[in-house]
Image (tube, helix red, strand yellow):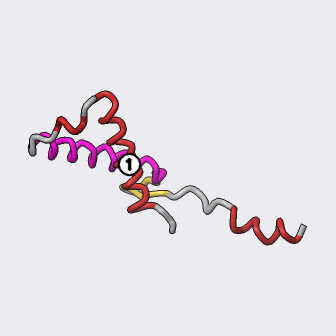
């Protein structure tokens, strides 16, 4: 019983991170998704301008993968607690 009392604060979730935008609070994952969408769009545009858009073939697979990778990057860069 003492072991459970010792480790329970270590595994307790810290709560939902919130982002205040214009006085309203939104979950941080929503901000990470929107930031990932913007970042993926910019990255796709840069690759197209550099004539490297062929790297993202097949498009129906690689564009969602790029979106998820960018969203995870935004989450880790701005919202991770560690």
Comparing 46 with 19, the one in front is 46
Figure quadrant of the N terminus: bottom right
Residue 30 place in picture, x, y as percent: 43, 47
- Name the residue tied to disc 1: 71
* Chain part drawn in magenta: 27-48
Residue 11 place in picture, x, y as percent: 69, 62
In the image, residue 12 sits, relative to residue 31, either above or below, namely below
Task: Inspect the magenta stretch and tell me whether residue 28 lies in it.
Answer: yes
Residue at left offset 21%, top offset 42%: 44
Circle 1 crowding by C-alpha within 10 Å: few under 14, some 14–19, many from 20: many
What number of labels is visible?
Answer: 1
Q: Secondary structure at mark 1?
A: helix
Residue at left offset 76%, top offset 68%: 7
Residue 14 place in picture, x, y as percent: 61, 62
Task: Inspect the magenta stretch and tell me whether residue 33 lies in it.
Answer: yes
In the image, residue 23 sits, relative to residue 65, either above or below, namely below
Residue 46 place in picture, x, y as percent: 15, 46
């Amino acid at each position: 019983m003492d072991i459970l009392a010792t480790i329970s604060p270590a595994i307790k979730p810290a709560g939902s991170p919130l982002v205040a935008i214009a006085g309203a609070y939104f979950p941080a994952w929503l901000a990470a998704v929107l930031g990932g969408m913007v970042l993926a769009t910019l990255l796709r545009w840069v690759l197209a301008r550099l004539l490297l858009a062929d790297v993202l073939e097949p498009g129906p697979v690689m564009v969602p993968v790029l979106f998820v990778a960018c969203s995870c990057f935004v989450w880790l860069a701005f919202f991770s607690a560690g």
